[in-house]
Amino acid sequence: MNVKLGMRIPPKIGAEGMEFTAKLAKQAGLDVLDLPRLTPEWKAACEAEGLGFGTIDAHYTGQLLSRDDARRANAVESAKKEISDIAALGGRVLFMCLVPEDHTLPRKEGFELFKDSFPEVVKHAEQQGVYIAIEGWPGPAPHYPTLGCTPEMWRAMFNAIPSRHFGLNYDPSHMVRLGIDYIRALGEFGERINHVHGKDTEILHDELYECGVLEATFGAKYGFSEGSWRYTIPGHGEVDWGKVAVRLERLGYQGAVSIELEDHRFWGSLEAEKQGIETAARHLEKYFK
């Protein structure tokens, strides 16, 4: 298997600028960058190092799930323009995390708003040759309002929008913390995977005893945690990346696997982030290269 590896850009690395970030990614053995925006400057920085694009972040997702009809309609037009702009610069995958602007919005109501706003957005993505990859992060506590973080929701959303241009950002770390079988999800939804995040989750058994699956009352012990679990780099958690790689290969997956660095052990300084990216890349190379 020879899948492109990439990364989302951590804050300390990103603060050093586009050229530095692209050089670091190349030196780490990566092939693509997931970008916060696709601009001519980012395109030039990536091309100078022989890097491709992973995903490009979307910027109007909350408004697409607004209860306000006019606000939602404006967001549809803004999203369509964003899709056209990234397509013109060679972007092919748009990353969306469907957290509504009102975090108290029930997911069932959010789904009805989704059915109103997204068909037009996805139709435009089809016309532009762009694929949408929705993130599985459940959103902030205590409401966890994100659309598209469980199989129940994916099934309903894909029934509403059958187009392959609307699919998943497959990130097993979120499924591990939610108790979802991430391998079974590959079997059911594999053909809708448009991008993959290289991130892991460790289950913290002492903390699980202390607070169960609820958010810790007095604060989590670690960063990138809510109590009984913590996000980690690949290889430091519960995910069997060998099994993930085998199933992606069977599916004929042609996209990238991008490291999303959310691990308190590799955070807080430029050197820590570099070490985290390099350590994660070496682990993923065992299965995807």
Image (spheres, grey):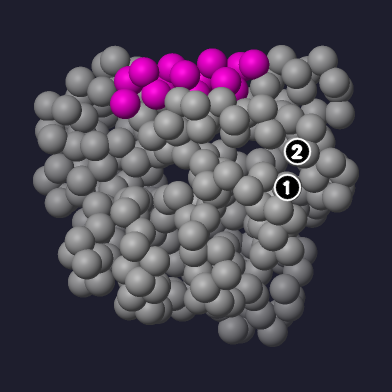
Q: Is residue 230 among what the camera can see?
A: no
Residue 114: assigned label: 2
Answer few, some or many: residues within 10 Å of disc 2's Cα (few below 14, many 20 plus, some between 14 and 19).
many
**Image position of 204 (left or right of 114):** left
Q: Position of residue 219 (x, y in %)?
A: 68, 60
**What secondary structure is marked by label 1?**
helix
**Is residue 219 within the magenta segment?**
no
Seen from the viewer's position, the closer of residues 149 and 90 is: 90
Task: Please give the range of residues in magenta.
Answer: 77-90
Residue type highlighted by circle 1: Ala
**Image position of 121 (left or right of 89):** right
**Is residue 88 within the magenta segment?**
yes
Which residue: 73% across, 64% down?
152
Seen from the viewer's position, the closer of residues 169 and 146 is: 169
Earlier-in-chain disc, 1 versus 2: 2
Q: Are marks 1 and 2 in contact (CB under 8 Å)?
A: yes
Residue type highlighted by circle 2: Phe
Q: Is residue 113 among what the camera can see?
A: yes
Q: Position of residue 13 (x, y in %)?
A: 30, 37
**What secondary structure is marked by label 2?**
helix
Seen from the viewer's position, the closer of residues 276 and 77 is: 77
Q: How many marks?
A: 2
Quadrant (top left/top right/bottom left/bottom right) for the N terminus: bottom left
Quarter of the view holding residue 34: top left
Which residue is identified by label 1? 160
Q: Position of residue 16 (x, y in %)?
A: 26, 29
**Image position of 226 (left or right of 126):** right
Answer few, some or many: residues within 10 Å of disc 1's Cα (few below 14, many 20 plus, some between 14 and 19).
some
